[in-house]
Image (cartoon, grey):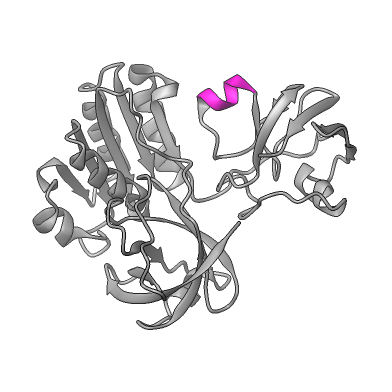
Amino acid sequence: MPTMKVTVAQIVSETPSIRSLRLVREDGRPLGPYRAGAHIDVTGPTGILRQYSLCGPPSEAQSLTIAVKREPDSRGGSAALHEVCEGDIIEIGEPRNILAVDPDATRHVLVAAGIGVTPLLSMAYELHGNGAEFELRYFTRSRTETAFADLLENRAEFRDRVRLHTGLSRADQRRTLDDLAATLTPGTAVYTCGPAGFMDTVAEVVTPVVGAPNLHIEHFEAAAVDTSGDTAFTVELDTGESFEIPADRSILSVLEENGIEVFKSCEEGICGSCVSGVLEGEPEHRDNCLSVADKAAGDQIALCVSRARTPKLVIELF
């Protein structure tokens, strides 16, 4: 995918472990607008590539803003971006979306926890700009760990749509989510991002009300998958080329080994870069990027992690 060099124009310490970086093009040309919920590939000083959600106003064309949480067990990605300074140059990819605003929803409820507020913040900007009915619920461990607290409470034009929930126990979180679910209707779209356990709870609470297609989840981490029962299968491209996929190899790795160019990034089933079309056969979905509706349709597959339920898949590279 195309990349570009950008300058770190501004750095803000949002919490002791989270900093936001505003990025601008070296040549001064616009970077946006983009669709709310988008993320970008970021290659930092160590050369490690990671994906970060855009959290600024999507209509702001001159810059892009990301927020980076420094993880204790960072392998160099987040730690390196906590060492960059204003004026430094980094490399990014173009914005792309797995998560996006549902145009058919009558109401939108954004439910974030921790650093998961980042993609939902851009959605709040867009929904407010469109005059949509929405609210943002943001759960954090403490006031100190609440990113963008001043913005959300005092400066954002949509601050009256924001409710902060700090320091709640798991039981109190569940009760708060139950109360929220009681206000929802089947026409409501719910968007959630945060730790896996938190998102599981959100899904458990709201899905019976809004239905699985109206729950939109943004994952930051790959889910654990049992691969002990994996078997080989055949993949055929729409061009007629055919490849055997061994039990211990991914479709992506086999295609690359044979000189087939495939867009890729995270290689963990999160970013959606390698999603391709399925023309024949039934995929076994193991990704965290396709929606429930997309998986049910069976006409797309994430080549880096997903496999086949049938002996053969015929795919079309996007």
| Relative depth, front residue between 103 and 154 | 103
Q: Is residue 284 above or below residue 289?
A: above
Magenta-tinted stretch = 293-298
Q: Is residue 116 above or below residue 236?
A: below
The answer to whether residue 146 is magenta is: no
Toward which corner of the image does residue 37 lie, by quadrant?
top left
| Quadrant (top left, top right, bottom left, bottom right) of the N terminus | bottom right
Q: Is residue 294 magenta?
A: yes
| Residue that appears at 58% across and 65% down | 49
Taking the spot 31% from the left edge, 58% from the top edge, the residue there is 61
Query: Quick check: can you spot residue 150?
Result: yes
Identify the main secondary structure in magenta.
helix
Q: Quadrant of the C terminus?
A: top right
Left or right of 41 in this view: 9: left
* Residue 15: image location, x then y, percent: 28, 68
Residue 18: tell me if it is visible: no
Compared with 169, 230 (above or below) is above
Locate residue 5 relative to residue 2 in the image: left or right.
left
Q: Nearer the viewer, residue 114 or 175?
A: 114
x%, y% of residue 158? 14, 46
Identify which residue, 44 or 285, lies in the foreground: 44
- Count of labels shown? 0
The quadrant holding residue 210 is top left
**Residue 212 in the image, given as x and y percentages of width and height:** 44, 22
Identify the residue at horizontal 56%, vertical 40% (top origin): 288
